Image: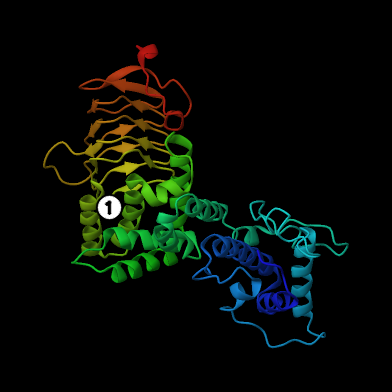
Amino acid sequence: MRPVLMGDVIALARALCLLPGDQRAGLAATLFYRAQVADKVMKRLRCPHPLWGNGSLMAVTSPLPKAPEAFLSDHAFLDSLLLVLRALRYRNVMGGRTENHHNGLDLRRNTLYGGVCNREGSPMAVSKQNVATVDPVWTRICDEAVKAIADEPLLGGLIHSSILHHPSFDRALAYRFSLKLASGEMSEQILREIADEAYASDPELAQAARADLMAVYERDPACNRFLQPLLFFKGYQALQAYRVGHWLMRQGRKDMAYFVQMRISEMFGVDIHPSARLGRGIMIDHAHSIVIGETAVVGDNVSMLHSVTLGGTGKEDGDRHPKIGNGVLIGAGAKVLGNITVGHCSRIAAGSVVLHDIPPCKTVAGVPARVVGEAGCDQPSVMMDQVIAGNL
């Protein structure tokens, strides 16, 4: 973050004092972070961040409404000013030591560095409402994006447009959705408006996307940065696009949901019916030739590999697709067919064809699949252990 001028402090305080007192620390934390990222972009690319300016607090507060110039009798302004000054002082940003102390402010601790203080000046924890405004997942993605540009400048345009240009994780997801699914039949602008509406009206979409991202990061040994799934992994991107399609289906916009399904299939080779219900923390590794039918239900924290089918057994109508419990691991090429139940924390071996219910915490293998032993661990989908020789 650039050296802080008195004008920066006053501008930030005037913006904060328009908010209720319990919301000020959250906004201040967000603005400090944006100034830090913008400063890194300015130093490495030698041009201002397109959304957040040159890395100064004045730049990141410029788009915000501000209270009129205040008198010292304005208690809201004084409280806001005190919050900003204490936050700066707590991390030694004042006194000419800005650039040499942890790159300014580090927001990964879910507090504003003592930005909310008691009357004696000691740091206090930020309220849950304020902590929610600090997004550690998005913070890390942006940090990784800045480093990625430094390592590979040729990707600067892609990373800028996909990540650093956006103020939040939701907006970046909406951009990737519209960019990937746009075609001559449906413009990027229309799809972007649809996605923005979906994320604005249903916060669960972005929360599920965060859980899915963490699932990929924790379970896929090829993933060593938060940045990768958002930019490069088609399984993750297809899953987030499905979630927008599912939202459209729930809004009664069936034809648009079917269009999204078609484009996901064309772009990613993943065919998930928009009426299927998928939980949080899903990892679809490699994601080639995935098929999930209309009445399928997939629980939380499920992992599946490429060429998995959750399908029906014929032309029957109604509830005809599998119900997958929480924590299930489905191996590559497995087919689970019919209105059957796969119990929580079970394993389905690669290439298996499952036609009957599976009890919880079991391993099944074969064509047709049969129980060959216990699941081997409490969380098969997390451990990703697909070796079953010891269970035979």
Q: Is residue 202 visible?
A: no
Which residue occupies the foreground of this view, 201 or 44?
A: 44
- Expressed as whole percent of the image width and height from the top left, the position of residue 2 reads 67, 66
- Expressed as whole percent of the image width and height from the top left, the position of residue 276 reads 29, 48
- Expressed as whole percent of the image width and height from the top left, the position of residue 43 reads 58, 62
- Amino acid under label 1? Ser
Which residue occupies the foreground of this view, 264 or 282?
A: 264
Name the side, left or right, on which 301 lies relative to 274: right
Q: Quadrant of residue 184?
A: bottom left
Residue sitting at 33 percent across and 55 percent down? 241
Name the side, left or right, on which 54 lies relative to 262: right
Query: Extreme left residue here?
Result: 315
Mark 1 is surrounded, within 10 Å at the Cα level, by few (under 14), some (14 to 19) or many (20 or more) other residues, namely many
Residue sitting at 61 percent across and 66 percent down? 35
Q: Look at the picture and state if 122 lies above or below 220.
A: below
Residue sitting at 77 percent across and 60 percent down? 97
Residue sitting at 44 percent across and 33 percent down? 221
Q: Look at the picture and state if 380 lies above or below 67.
A: above
Which residue occupies the foreground of this view, 307 or 253?
A: 307
Name the side, left or right, on which 296 lies relative to 387: left
Q: Is residue 199 visible?
A: yes
- Expressed as whole percent of the image width and height from the top left, the position of residue 10 reads 72, 78
Residue denoted by label 1: 275
Which residue occupies the foreground of this view, 390 or 267?
A: 267
Q: Look at the picture and state if 133 lies above or below 61.
A: above
Q: Quadrant of residue 299?
A: top left
Secondary structure under the numbered disc 1 in the rendered image: loop
